[in-house]
Image: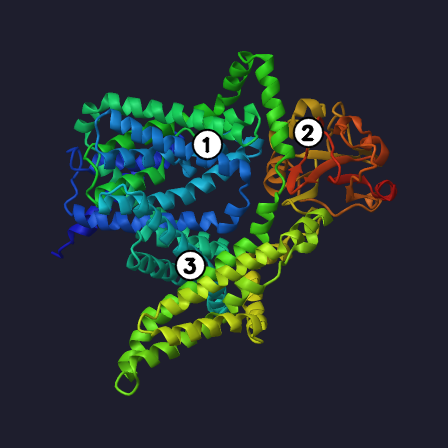
Amino acid sequence: MIHLPNLIQDLGIILGIAAVVTLIFKFLKQPVVLGYLIAGFLVGPHVPLFPGITETESVKVWAEIGVIFLLFGLGLEFSFKKLTQVGKAASITALFEIIFMLGLGYLTGQILGWSKIDSLFLGGILSISSTTIIVRAFDELNMKGRRFVSLVFGVLIVEDLVAILLLVLLSSVAVSQAFEGVELMNSSLRLGFFMVLWFVMGIYLIPILLQKIRHHLSNETMLIVSISLCLMMVMIAANVGFSPALGAFIMGSLLAETRDGHRIEQLIVPVRDLFGAVFFVSVGMMIDPKILVEYFWIILLMTTITIVGKLVSSSIGALVSGRSLKNSVQAGMSLAQIGEFSFIIATLGVTLKVTSDFLYPIAVAVSAVTTFTTPYLIKYADPFYFWIEKRLSPTIKERLARYEAAMASDSGDNMLSLIWKEYGIKILLNSVVVMALALTMSRLALPQIEKAWLIWIEPSLISSIVCLGAIIISGPFLWAVVMSRARHAEVYHPETLIRLRRLQYGIAFFRFAIGVALAAFVVGQFASLTAVPAIILLAAATIGVYFSRYAEPLYQKVEDRFLDNLTEKERDELQKRPMTPELAPWSANLAEFVVSPHSPFIAKKLIDTALKEKFGITITMIQRGEQRILAPNRNEMLLPYDRVFVIGTDEQLIQVKAVLEVTAPSQPHAEIATFGLDSVILKSSSEYINRPIRDCGLREKVDGLIVGIEREGQRILNPDSSLALKENDLLWVVGNLTKLKQLKST
């Protein structure tokens, strides 16, 4: 008889039980992750109902591979550019919630008499919400078109990044067993340095690599290439002292920026799901029912802290960021759970053997309970908001409304943010590249050259030559730090440019100081240099930056290639997108739908359909036979085969299309050639300044609607009719183009 290895036997048991349990959970319409946890519990060593697992250590290896692919998949969904598009509200909400829950978790652990490490890990476990559970709940409740959902998704993006940072910081604390601020600061700076470096090098090199071999990449080859890149980054991260999960996440986010990102994400799903199932099953295997019974009241306490703490902290964070009370409560109710990242953080503690045995099953139990409660919390968010609103005094309501309006009006770019955008980002990226080149030349190239030439050349001379080479190679990037000009100055308001020019001398001095410091850093990496050669090389680097003829054109080529790679995916998607009118600075456009006779909104007034409230869209025109209803009012009805023109984002339009049961958007009709999208800037003499949209009379004058406003950098899509217009507002209006042109001339 052929001997069957225990590992294969164990894997068959794990996947077999997982398949059965998940089918049951699919039938019950419950999250599959819970099914995996229960499957692991059933095949684990603590429940003798099924054949037990013999090779537990091997299963742990499979589980670690599962974490790598889970983080790789999350990285493919993350994308660094999504983080830049999150916005102030989501960032403030996420950071407020994470800091609050970290502190609350740590304080709770200390009150219960736990160790500092256990308390710190508890804070990390409770601070991160579950992307998987929330997205599934929104899908099942058909809520993806609601306004607060974009805020929740933004918060989840920030949380994913913070979770990665927590993994690194918790690893450092666990290994050193120290809570020293200096050590944590060093770890954070080191992490930031490597993340920026990997981002710059990845964006520059990976798209070039994929472009060279794209014609040879079948699905099979693409899968192998992407997995190999993932594992290479895992090895790099591990060799520089970070967790393998960080490397997987970084590579996933880098590949997400390429035009092949979506294809790779689809190919990796089966692999991610397979190893992810093994990981979650292994999590379930570690659940000891005795510990659950022993710590029942603590589990109940942690569940309460998670739900109440996240609800309160997320809601307050959203309020502080300038969101309405309703949106804040809805977001808070949606984020009140923990999930996959909490498992990974808990697993980290077990792997490093720094946390107590009871912490892991407590985290799993709390996650399971909050997973069940999440859909109900989201569903009853509106009734809970109305309950709160009834108990607020008119004074508090008025103050909240004023604060929301003030935050909306003051959300534009200030001078510091402008300087950061135009100079700070470029200085940061190029400084990291310069330091990386210096470290590479001194720690990798120099030892190899010394081995080969030390017999014939003096060590100090070798160091001088290699140092000079490092200066020459890093020269273009040093030039960029000190001399490069702003790329986007032309898009700013003239008054802003005047203020920026007044600071030019101070900015120039600051950049020069950074350039000198970087040059000194490069020279300082070569310890064997004597004083005189070091001073000469430093002076040569400083002078060369200012007078080099090759640095500027070479750097421009590098920067253009980097920016070209960075925007490759967007350009590719833009080419594939149908040529429909687009509301540019948003990912919003004007689409045409045909109302099906089977639509639930047939013969209903627009006010009763609540399409804007549910999906965030605006109906700009209804074409009914030969009749055109421009800017229809709330009492207008939808009839079968009406051609409805809708403004909204891609996601919103997909949702609306589903409820209207339309066919593919038809080609623009010749009769509506004069109907379209245009922009108008409100000058100081405009009669509309300080007047609400509903009272300005634009609907009647141009047969249209204001569908977007740009105000001091802030972008408001489908603004509320109560919003007051301000000087220098850029209005995006859908209406009669002839009348719009007349309006612009006045």
Q: Which mark is residue 137?
A: 1
The number of discs equals 3
Identify whether 149 is placed above or below 480.
Answer: above
Residue 566 sits in which quadrant? bottom right
Q: Position of residue 337 (x, y in %)?
A: 39, 30
**Which amino acid type corresponds to the residue marked 2 in the rendered image?**
Asp
- Front tag of 1 and 2: 2
Residue under numbered circle 2: 720
Label drawn at residue 198: 3
Q: Secondary structure at mark 2?
A: loop
Q: Earlier in the sequence, mark 1 or mark 2?
A: 1
Q: Is residue 61 left or right of residue 384?
A: left
Mark 1 is on which residue type?
Ala
- Among all residues in the image, which is located at the extreme front? 532
Q: Are marks 2 and 3 in contact (CB under 8 Å)?
A: no
For the residues marked 1 and 2, what is the alpha-carbon distance in whole angstroms? Answer: 28 Å
Q: Looking at the picture, how far across and down is residue 142, in whole percent?
A: 53, 31
Snapshot quadrant of residue 190: bottom left
**Residue in the picture at 63% in, 58% down:** 487
Q: Quadrant of the N terminus?
A: bottom left
